[in-house]
Structures are given as structure tokens and as C-alpha cells.
Image: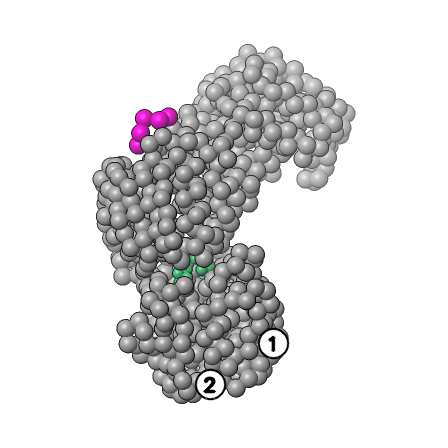
Amino acid sequence: MLKIPYLDLPPLCGAAGTVRLPGSKSISNRLLLLAALAEGETRIEQLLEADDTAVMLDALRSLGCAWHRNGDGSVTVQGLGGHLPVSQADCFLGNAGTAMRPLAAALALLSARDGGRFFLSGVARMHERPIRDLVDALRGLGCQIEDLGQPGYPPLALSGPAPLALDQPVRVRGDVSSQFLTALLLTLPLVAQRAIVIEVEGELISKPYVEITLALLARFNVKVEREGWQRFTIPAGSRLRSPGRLVVEGDASAASYFIALGALGATQAPVRIEGIGRDALQGDVRFADAAAAMGAQIEWEDHALRVRRGAWPLKAIQLDCVAIPDAAMTLAVMALYADGPSRLSGIASWRVKETDRIAAMATELRKLGATVAEGPDWIEVHPLQSWRRTAIHTYDDHRMAMCFSLAALHPLTGTPPQDLRILDPGCVAKTFPDYFETLFGLVQADPAHIPVLCIDGPTASGKGTLADRVADQLGYWVLDSGALYRATALAARCAGVALDDEPRVAALAARLPLHFEAGRCFLDEEDVTDALRAEEVGLGASAVAALPAVRQALHQLQLSFRRVPGLVADGRDMGVAIFPQAQLKVFLTASAAQRAERRYKQLISKGFSANIAGLLQDLEARDARDKSRSASPLAPAQDARLLDNSDLSIDASVEQVLAWWDEKRAFAD
Ligand SMILES: O=C(O)C1=C[C@@H](OP(=O)(O)O)[C@@H](O)[C@H](O)C1
Ligand SMILES: C=C(OP(=O)(O)O)C(=O)O
């Protein structure tokens, strides 16, 4: 997960590969609540792991519901059988509408029936998202609900006991959010000694989400009767009973980004999306039809789909999106690549979601250079003629971040490909914490467009730490090129090859079975991270690095680390020999005495024995060898910035390098 201030995406030229979707947010949070309220134990598989489900799980725990995560990631929930063991709780629900609305209804009804006092709050934006229609409906039943902030918005206090009047139909408005009706449907079975009728006022929006609610209630033994979208009856004596085990479908709204990616960039192999089928419960699966109408080629499998680019440019679309409010945002970005203006209507609800999405979408699309018109419940997006290099604000809205990442695909027009900056990319954590990492696994870019930042310098200058920290801040990959030489030396030693046997060492280097995983380094299956740090391996690395044939053999391997979104390359000749076109080259130095002391501390902390005078001697000898070798001697690139960190903290060094990086990469705001 990227928790960084911004992420720069290079211009992308294609996409292919397979993605496994995270679990559906809407299904996950409904199942968690139903499982908690029901009788019996429920095992939920492929539950979404993200902020929205985390706040629901935390809330359930504070309400006295026991749950645990199993080894395979599934969650087992012990149902409370409709009775809370606590009479007080304070639940923070972040910005999860699927937690706030249903929990407000559950706690209003349970505190009215059994007594108690409960508080629900969220992030600042949650306190601007309306809940009045639900509160009015619940108050109509006799529930005691206090607005603790602005009337009609969270935070709320729910308390009781209070008599419930369930003999009259419960009336709820359906034209601001369908989640109000969903909240009542999910929770009224708790008090359904007699049949309870719900009547919807106003035209219900987002209907497919109510279908999800009804389908999942049926799995929990409650069969709601309905007359169209106006009247719903919860039969007398309904009781929530666990079906035992449930599997969450992949998130169909999240699928929209990859369907769009296929439509925009899959010119050769398809983008294959696993986790949903055509008959998915979620209405957003119909986004695929909208994408097909714009030209995407879609082939369905049982639980997956394959998407390729079809029409190009895409075909403009005019669509009422009232049934697919979340996935519709993706269409607005696809519209940049269409053959004419596209108009999305029926999206009034965008204004009261994670941000005012109509305003946010229009503002950011215009910053890219697009002509956009907007109304109270529609947006019209014209194809983009001339792309501007810009920083996209994401308004703490996961969908803004995910949608706009698609705008990094090459434009249609002749304008030169542009980088794109996504501010606060970590906001995707609401529903898809690994969105960007997943995206990086699918997209292609011309290597020449992928930014590289080189940090070269002598041994023990702190390059590795600096490179890791800078890469973390930028969301980039790291190439620890020294590890490749150390691994070559280690592999040679294990194979009994003399370090000065140039052809054989080079042959080993060319087939080095090296890979990096979660900060660890593996030779074949063996984790050699610590072994590579041993002093004699370091000396061996210096010896093999002096062999031109070995450097040649490792050259290609090093280039292959240049991947989207960018690379921080740490070594001795990164800026001079491997990435001479790098956007920024830093040559890091520190006095020999300082470096010897750092290396000493590093070795001691890892449990190796060390002698500081000996280290200093080795280090000076190694410097001399590195500087005087004929193949790529250690020297700053001509255009390198020199950074002597003898007296600088690591934080100060990171700050300096990032400041230089920013200087090179100005984005319009
Ligand atoms: O019930 C649900 O799971 C949801 C309903 C929709 O909200 P509205 O009914 O407010 O449009 C949707 O936008 C939201 O992401 C999830
Ligand atoms: C509107 C959304 O979320 P919520 O469930 O918080 O309403 C969304 O995910 O796009």
C-alpha cells in the first residue's frame, strides 16, 4: 500500500495480464453485519480487507461481537442472535457509508428495544454525508436519535429504551441514497415479530444495491416480499440465521478500472480480470456493457472476463448511470479517449459521496485540458485534444485516484506523452489498498519514459538506506545493484568457481537465479539477504565487479529493473554506465572514517564480529580498487549532484534528494 504524498505515473503505452479482484465492499460489509446480528457462526471467505471493512470489523468488536481471522484470510463471525452484550459503544466508521447507514439503523432499533446508548461518528466528510432520510424513518418508528453535529448528518447518538411503533408502514426516501432503504431492510428483521412494511418515497436510486441486500438477506433466511421498488414487506417472524459459509464476489466497481485499462491499452494480449462473472450479484458488473458500448472487446468466462481494445478511438456514450453510480466515474475518464462528447446522467448522488464527485471530476478533467460541462445530475466530457502535465487532486476519494490513474495512458493526439501526478494515492485504501501495485503489474511503458533516480557512491556511504527511503517516498522500485555483484560472488563461491576466473564467473552472472521479494533477496529458493551482507562477500563483490565480462553480463539484468512507475538505482556506476539518461544522479560520499564507523555499527547490529581499524583499511583499499578499475571506475557522472552526508542525518539526506527530484519534475497544480 502506498502511503505517500504523491505518485508520478509515466506515460503508459499498453496493458496486459491478469488481475484478481479484491472482495466486494458492498457484499463484505453487508455480510459482516448480517453475520454479527444473526444466530450462528458465519465463515466469510474472500472478505475485502480495506479501510471500509476494517471500520465495520472494529465496530462489531466494540459492540461485543466476537470474530477472528483464519489462516486463509477468511473471517469467522460469532453471531449475536440479535442481542448486543453491551449497552454502550462508541464506533468510528471512517468514511464507510456501508457501515454508517446500516449500523445507525441497527443500533437505533436495538437500543429502542433493549436500552443502551451508542455513538456513531466518522471522518469530517462523513459528517457532511446526509443521513436525514434514514434518521427520519427511524424516528417515525419511535427510535431516539440525536444529531450531535449538524442536523441530518453524523455524528449520531442512538439511545433507548423507547417503544417502537411497527404497525404502520415505515416510510423512507430513496432518491438521495439507496443505503437508507438497505439499512432498514438489513435490520428490521431484528424486530419483526409482526410483518413490517417499508414504503419508498421518491424514485429509488442505485437499485442494484438493494438487489444485493435482498439476495444476501435471503441467504440469512429472510425472504423479503416486494412490490416493484415501492413497497417491501419483511414477513412476520423473520429471523436472521447464518447459512454457515459464504464467499464474497470480487468487487465489480473495482473491476471497472481494469476493464477500462483493457479497453484503452490491451492491444495485444487481453487484461484478464478474475473474481466476477456475468451473473454477479453486483449491479456494477453492467459497467462491462457500457465499456463494450464504447468499443471494448469483452469475453466472459465463468468467474472472469477478458478485455481488449476494440474501437479506437473509443465511441462516445450517452448513458443514464443511476444504476451504476460508482463505476460510472470510470466512464468519465474513458470519455477523454472517445470520438466525441460523452454525457453521463442520473448521477446526482455523486454530489454526496466521498466528495462532490461531479465537481471534483469536472475540475480535474479540466486541469488535464478537457472541456467539461456539468449540471446538478450530469456531466459531459469532451475528448482531450492537448494533454497537460498536471497534478490530480483526489479529495480523499479512492475512486478519483483509481479513475485518474487511467489518464496516464498515452493520449490519442500528437501531443508528446505526459507524466501524471496523483496526489494522496493512499486514499485508495478505502476499498483497494493495493490498487496501484496491481496496476503496475499490468501496464507497460516505453523504458525511456520511466523515471530513474541514481544514487552512486563508495562503499558504506549509506546509499542503500537512502535509496530505500527515497524509493518509499516516491513509490518506486529499488535496484540494489551491489546485491547483484554480491550475489554473483556468493554464487561463485558456492559453485567453487575462482573469483578471478572471468569467463566462468560471467557465465554464472548471466544466469543468476536472483529475485527480490518484500525487501528480501533470494538465490533460487534460498533467502540470501543476510549472507550477502557478510564482509567477505562484499570483498568478493568488489573483485568480480572489476571483471568487464561480469559487468557486461549484469548490464541487461539491471536495465530490467526499470519498471513502472519508476526506479531508484543504487550502486557505483548507475548514473555513468547503466542509466546515463537518468533524470537525477546523486553521488553520495562521506569521509572514510565515517563510513568505517557506519559499517562497523551495521555489522555489530547484525551479530557479525568487526574491527573498526581493519574495516577502515579494507574500505580504503576497496575505494582505491573501485576508482582505479578499468571497467566503470567509481566516479561521479558529469551531471551528478554531489551529496556529502558525513554530517547529515538520513532524514536530511532524503529531504535533499527529494528536493532535487522535485526541482526536475514540476507539475501544474
Ligand atoms: O449499498 C451499497 O453498498 C452502496 C450503494 C451506493 O450508494 P447510494 O445508494 O448512496 O448511491 C454506492 O454508491 C455505494 O458505494 C455502495
Ligand atoms: C460511495 C461509495 O462509498 P460508500 O459505501 O461510503 O457510500 C463508493 O465506494 O464509491
Taking the image as drawn, is residue 368 in sight? Answer: yes
Within-10-Å neighbours for mark 2: few <14, some 14–19, many 20+: few
Q: Residue flagged by tag 1: what amino acid is it?
A: Arg
Image-quadrant location for residue 235: bottom left
Q: Quadrant of ligand 2?
A: bottom left
Residue occupying image coordinates x 28% and y 76%: 227
On the picture, is 586 further left or further right than 329?
A: right
Residue 117: assigned label: 1
Within-10-Å neighbours for mark 1: few <14, some 14–19, many 20+: many
Question: Height in image: 567 above or below 102?
Answer: above
The residues bearing labels 2 and 1 have C-alpha atoms spaced at a distance of 20 Å
Coordinates of residue 465 in the picture (x, y in percent) = 62, 34
Asked whether 29 or 92 is in front, the reply is 92
Image-quadrant location for residue 660: top right
Asked whether 487 or 435 is in front, the reply is 435
Q: Secondary structure at mark 2?
A: loop
Which contiguous range is marked in magenta? Answer: 412-416
Q: In the rendered image, which residue does mark 2 sit on?
A: 165
Taking the image as drawn, is residue 2 in sight? Answer: no
Please state the total of marks drawn on the protein image: 2
Question: Height in image: 551 above or below 382?
Answer: above
